[in-house]
Amino acid sequence: MPKVVLPNGLTVLFHPKPGAAVVVEALIKVGSNVESASERGIAHFLEHILFEGTEKRPTNRAITNEIERIGGDFNAYTTGDRTCFHIKVLKKHFCLAVDVLADIFQHSLFNPADIAKEKNVVLKEIDMVYDEPRFYQWILFQKHLFTKHPARYPTYGDRAVIKGLSREKVIQYFQRHYVPNNMVVVVVGDVRKWKEEIQRHFRQKKGTVPRCSFPREPPARHHVEKKEKKNIVNTYLVLGYKTVPRGHPDSYVLDVINGILGRGQSGRLFTEIRAKKGLAYEVGSQHAAELSAGYFAAYASIDRKNIATVKKMMVAELEKIKTASEQDVQEAKEFVEGDYLLEVEDPQKLADQLLFWEQINNAALVQGYVPRIRKVAVRDVQRVAKKYFRKYACVVLEGK
């Protein structure tokens, strides 16, 4: 897979993929994990404000309509470790996609009126997350799982910080992090002269990349339990453990464990808690392995009266992984392989994966993911379960 670093430090990846669509996606190596207490939420806020107007396209509609009028898709997201902007269009519109993406990074206006407006939008987004227990349960879980690592803070930030943001502070944060040598652009599709097109449009000057380090997250010494009452009908339960970042070899083993416990309607958690007992509607597991932190968790939406029963069943299923069979592991490996390869058939999902692995280490690791999964053995699954599934954090959003 071609990879070049332009004179200004911008890394550019190209993945040829036959088809009508082309995806141009930019990753900026900044997310909520690198924010100080007085900055919490700025990375996510920038994701919003960069859609609000440039010198060439002075309004939100002028920017988004450039892509949407030709049937394309333009969106963005922020995580603890990165901010990504992607455009998906027909390949004949490749040059336009590059132009629009480069424009928001180099010529955004940061109008005071837009900043004031987007503060309200982001505050409503925070309200929406808080109102939606399927989202909020994960905010509460990470808050009580991690004690030192900034993953304990939500990506959307702090309401007081958002309310107090000034134009100067937003621009300073932008200028510090949105420098070409802190960015990666990937092109996925059947296009030519991709390097020349990116170089022609992305003309920012090289900057100084901020140094980033994270406090050492201590191992859990005891179980943590937190219950929060909400004015909702269902009760939501999440129980999980600190694990490892994606760069650790055990993260692949945890993907296989996730395949045993949480795959669709045949995973163990679904089978035992919903199919056999009818104790939940949504039930499954989640493995998160990011740049600097990771966790593994089981979750379920249940009746309040079944909290103790379902929690006991979750712990039992997690414990059974320590004696997983050859068949369990083989089926899970087949699931993970198929799920992954089908996902990256979508050029936008493939672009996401290429950028993710490039930030972890090298985009070429995309091709090495399935072989690593295939190498996972029963003894690996048993060892990893014994190592990490020890002291859990359990959070409950208790309904009526």
Image (tube, grey):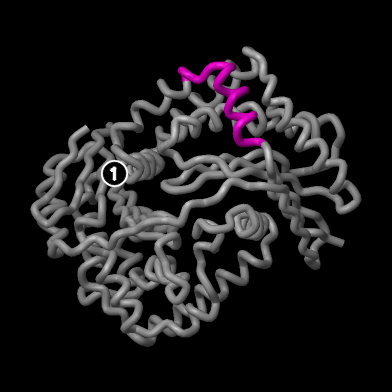
Q: Which residues are magenta?
A: 374-389
Q: Which residue is located at x 37 percent, y 38 percent?
A: 350
Please tell me whether the stretch drawn in magenta is mainly helix, strand or loop.
Answer: helix
The quarter in which the N terminus is drawn is top left
Farthest top residue? 326
**Mark 1 = which residue?**
22
In which image quadrant can residue 83 be found? bottom left
Residue visible at 52% across and 44% down?
294
Residue 323 x %, y %: 69, 20
Q: Residue at x 29, y 37 (%)?
A: 362
Q: Residue at x 36, y 55 (%)?
A: 84
Q: Nearer the viewer, residue 80 or 65?
A: 80
Choose between 88 and 251: the one closer to the eye: 251
Q: Residues within 10 Å of mark 1 (few under 14, many from 20)?
A: many
Q: Is residue 261 left or right of residue 330?
A: right
Residue 255 vs 289, above or below: the answer is above
